[in-house]
Amino acid sequence: MAKIQSVRGTYDLYGDAKRKMKKVTATGASVVEKYGFEEIETPIFEFTEVFARNLGDTSDIVTKEMYCFEDKGGESLTLRPEGTAGVVRAFVSEGMQQNLPVKFYYHGPMFRYERPQKGRQRQFTQFGVELLGVETPQADIEVIAMAYEFLQKLGLGNQVTVEINSLGDAESRDAYRQKLVAYLKQHFDELSEDSKNRLERNPLRILDSKEECDKAVIENAPRYADSLNEASRQFFADVLHGLDLLNIKYRVNDRLVRGLDYYSHTVFELTTDKLGAQGTVLAGGRYNGLVAQMGGGDVAGIGWACGVERLSMLLDEDVALPRPIAVIPVGEDTNDKALEVAYQLRLAGFSVEQSYSGNMKKRMAKANKVNACKAIIIGSDEAANNTVMLKDLDSGEQKIVAQTDLIKELN
Ligand code: ATP
Ligand code: MG
């Protein structure tokens, strides 16, 4: 039989890698909860339509990356490639428009059929936020501040750059699209095959291209900022003003467009130079048309998502486990006592390792291996007197303690 393996682009997560991911999500949750965001969990699969219609027919995700399948009832379903469409679907189908604003965060697995490489998997984890029902730039400032604080709390503050741009409102976007298409048509022959195909369907995406021939053309393309109407210009200025006020450093990147069709006004990415081509760790933007597109009325939205694996890879230090207390029975008839003591300590909130077998020496070696801070050694005499030997494994000091005083002593 062939060797059983995990599917290409998927990974088993355990040990330090898993601990780092847990730290990333726990840090994210603690930051965004302070801003009033509450956790939501939506299904891992949705009707294909939820993604196909709303991410835009021309986005890379929809055209190339989705895991779609037909279930036994003949429904076309898709494993979620990102979180926003599902959260907005839930917002609409649960009728949450009555009580705005709505603030959610989520984390969990996402699925995209991509070429696996460092920082790029077929199953990966995102942590993200969505803020629905606020049209003013305050929302943009707040969610960017949240992202910034999150990365600061992870200790990544000085490795990360905030890149920001404005796509303006629908009018500005249409105006820019026309100018861009006119310009690109003049340079049609110089474009990559992919970009030639995108020219009619999704010209903005060409600005994102990593192909050298495209980059040369893009270099002299019309500037987005020149197409923003007055209202959009003011909106963007207000967002930047807020970031200045909070001392959040950013770089306006006129070429930043994001791949999805639903963005308007503010788009932003937090990038690092540490992960090669996979340098974007967090990305987001405003999506004012998305709720309406799903039949939920005119409700503004803004959010971001980060790649939990990519962020974990940036954490240098191992995430330490709490140091346990080792409970070590020695001699005959001390196992019951050890079991009892270990259970009492755990009930009192201590982390306890029970050694299961072996002589005293072996068990002490195990206690050191799990980096225990203290050992509680129970011999026959101690068991008979309801005492234990408490040993500090760092200093080597040891003393006899009555079982009833043990918790007090450890505190
Ligand atoms: P990229 O340009 O790297 O393909 P993207 O624009 O497709 O990113 P988003 O859809 O904005 O990414 O997802 C937000 C974040 O999720 C990314 O910044 C990244 O950190 C993470 N991410 C996206 N795709 C993957 C993947 N295949 N494997 C691991 N992380 C990913
Ligand atoms: Mg991608």
Image (tube, rainbow, N blue to C red):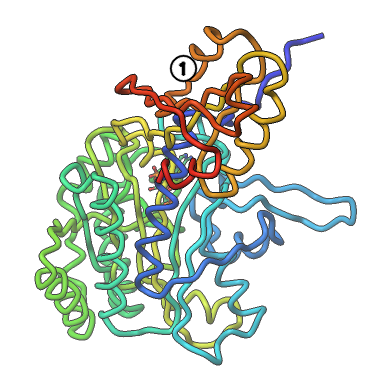
Q: Name the residue under label 1.
A: 369
Direction from residue 301 to residue 241 in the image, left or right:
left
Q: Is residue 121 above or below residue 99?
A: above
In which quadrant will I find the N terminus?
Answer: top right
Residue 304 in percent (x, y) is at 39, 61
- Horizontally, residue 333 falls left or right of residue 108, namely right
Residue furthest to the right in view is: 73
Identified by mark 1, the residue type is: Lys
Residue 189 visible here:
no
The residue positioned 31% from the left and 36% from the top of the image is 315
Q: On the image, which quarter does residue 87 sit in?
A: bottom right
Residue occupying image coordinates x 45% and y 29%: 16
At x 22%, y 36%, the residue is 273
Q: How many labels does the image show?
A: 1
Q: Which of 374 and 35 is in front in this view?
A: 374
Q: Position of residue 102 (x, y in %)?
A: 48, 80
The single residue placed furthest to the bottom in the displayed view is 98
- Mark 1, Cα crowd under 10 Å, few <14 / some 14-19 / many 20+, is few
Q: Which residue is drawn at 57% across and 22% down?
A: 328
Q: Residue 233: percent from the left, percent from the top?
A: 17, 78
| Position of 383 relative to 307 (above/below) | above
The reply to whether residue 188 is visible in this rendering is yes
Q: Quadrant of residue 164?
A: bottom left
Tell me the SS state at disc 1: helix
For ligand 1, tell me if the residue under mark 1 lies within 8 Å: no
Q: Is residue 397 left or right of residue 326?
A: left
Image quadrant where residue 336 sits:
top right
Indicate left or right for 220 with 205 as reference: left
Pick whichever, 213 or 364, lies toward us.
364
